[in-house]
Image (cartoon, helix red, strand yellow):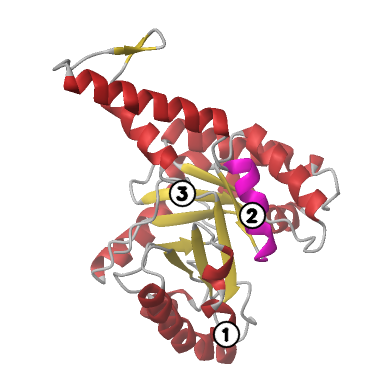
Amino acid sequence: MNAPPALLRSVLFAPGNRADLIAKLPRSAPDAVVIDLEDAVPGTAEAKAAARPVAHDAARDLIAAAPHLAVFVRVNALHSPYFEDDLSVLTPELSGVVVPKLEMGAEARQVAQMLQERSLPLPILAGLETGAGVWNAREIMEVPEVAWAYFGAEDYTTDLGGKRTPGGLEVLYARSQVALAARLTGVAALDIVVTALNDPETFRADAEQGRALGYSGKLCIHPAQVALAHEYFGPTEADRARARALLDAAAAAAQRGHGAFSFEGQMVDEPMLAKARTLLSHEA
């Protein structure tokens, strides 16, 4: 399996039926990419069937060409007529599988079991995109195979019969609930898509709100959104400086033969050091 980084600041999507666009995904340097068999492919049996071999081969080629890039495939929803056939696209070399519109923990467990039966022990990026999915966010994220979750505002609003507005007040509660459930379960939460492709200020405002709510990264549907996502979800220079100072202090303590030491008034343990290393792994 092509293991993804612990921190996914940006997750860039491309249609599963467009090998040309999939091949271009690494150019904007996202932390992860998703080859999408769901929303980005027309909802007919013929279109879905035609996309599967394209997605399979494109994923294989992308993993070979960009071995350090986290590559996911988004399948169709569990109860759709396309789900089981979509599993044929998955391979152990992927970094994970994106499963949209999960609504209960039992569904996430069912997906995990189906993957295990096919010798595909892939971690799951769970899509919470309905009222039930948001309501049951915590139990979905408590399934061990669920490593990340995203909130889908467009489908959620449709499910509730609501309407999307520029300020996003209609999704604030649900957006907050997903972030809270992620925090309680230790799952990484990925923030909503911004559909305004040529409006960087709208993206920035939305990303700033998502970061304030506790999200650790953002879904992107255009390459230009990747760098913007990194502005808000990447560590700050102050964060990097503190991490470097902590690791320097750890190295100095080790040279003195000290197993335990304090830093800025706190006793340091291995999880703190691991977090600092992860943070610095995103330095250019």
Is 130 magenta? The answer is no
Q: Residue at x 69, y 44 (%)?
A: 207
Task: Tell me, yes or no, if residue 49 can be seen here.
Answer: yes
73 left or right, relative to 270:
right
Q: Is residue 75 above or below residue 276?
A: below
Q: Which mark is residue 148?
A: 3
x and y, in percent, of residue 63 in the image: 38, 73
Of all residues shown, which one is farthest toward the left? 257
Q: Is residue 136 above or below residue 33?
A: above
Please name the residue that numbered disc 2 is placed on.
227
Is 230 magenta? The answer is yes
Question: What kind of element bears circle 3?
Answer: strand
The label nearer to you, 3 versus 1, is: 1
Whichever of labels 1 and 2 marks the residue nearer the N terminus, that label is 1
Q: Amino acid at mark 1?
A: Asp
The label nearer to you, 1 versus 2, is: 2
Please name the residue that numbered disc 1 is placed on.
20
How dense is the environment of label 1, judged by Cα within 10 Å: few (below 14), some, or many (20 and up)? few
Q: Could you say which is closer to the camera, residue 233 or residue 258?
A: 258
Q: Which residues are magenta?
A: 222-233
Q: Amino acid at mark 3?
A: Trp
Question: What kind of element bears circle 2?
Answer: helix
Q: Could you say which is closer to the camera, residue 98 or residue 272?
A: 272
The label nearer to you, 3 versus 2, is: 2
54 left or right, relative to 68:
right
